[in-house]
Amino acid sequence: MSPFPRPKAESWQSRLWRWGFNLFPAYRGTGGRVVYIAPDWREVHVALPLSWRTRNYVGTLFGGSMYGAIDPIYMLMLIHNLGPGYVVWDKAATIRFRKPGRTTLYARFVLSEDELQTIRRLACELPSLDRVYPVELVDRLGVVYASFEKTLYVRKAKKE
């Protein structure tokens, strides 16, 4: 059970995306699970349980699983919200491991309408832009175990 409230019920389309995402082998291998996708793709929740698949040599959550569970989310959210008129790529990430993970951890990803309008405006003015999004993996009580900064590259798609 995620510690984050769900602002909207999932639609059948977002539920289908969630199921497909969790079955996709590259994401499934991280051990992470998408547990919620808002119908408008403006909010996504992820859970990363401690299990035999995500446990490292010393019995805590493997750092690669931590990063892998959060890695593609903002890129997919931007792709769904901006549409085919934009190119979106992951560009960089920084990770700060704060505590060893010994329980299920959760992440919440949110895109505001203001952020999407800013991207659209800047993409018309600049050849490309980078946007930085913070993400934290927390336990049920909100204690932070890892902090990430994801840098995404965005530009208008070239018309052919």
Image (tube, rainbow, N blue to C red):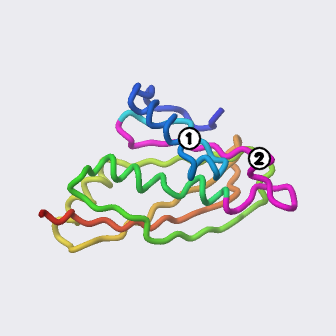
Mark 2 nearby-residue class (10 Å; few <14, some 14–19, many ≥20) = many
Towards the viewer: 26 or 63: 26
Image quarter for residue 68?
bottom right
The residue under label 1 is: 22
Frontmost of labels 1 and 2 is 1
Image quarter for residue 89?
bottom left
* x then y, percent, for residue 145: 70, 57
Image quarter for residue 56?
bottom right
Q: Give the mark, 1 or 2, whose residue is nearer the N terminus.
A: 1
Is 123 situated left or right of 15 in this image? left
Is 48 situated left or right of 157 in this image? right
Secondary structure under tag 2 reads loop
- Residue displayed at 67% across by 48% down: 31
* x then y, percent, for residue 155: 26, 66
Mark 1 nearby-residue class (10 Å; few <14, some 14–19, many ≥20) = some
* x then y, percent, for residue 27: 57, 50
Amino acid of disc 1: Asn
Is 103 situated left or right of 79 in this image? right
- Residue displayed at 49% across by 55% down: 72
Rendered position, 56 above or below 21: below
Which quadrant is the C terminus positioned in? bottom left
Q: Read off the magenta span.
A: 40-64
Is 40 situated left or right of 25 in this image? left
Secondary structure under tag 1 reads helix
Residue most extreme to the left = 160
- State the CA–CA distance, disc 1 to disc 2: 17 Å
Assign the magenta stretch its main secondary structure.
loop
Which quadrant is the N terminus positioned in? top right
- Residue displayed at 36% across by 48% down: 112
Rendered position, 47 above or below 114: above
The residue under label 2 is: 50
- Residue displayed at 20% across by 61% down: 121
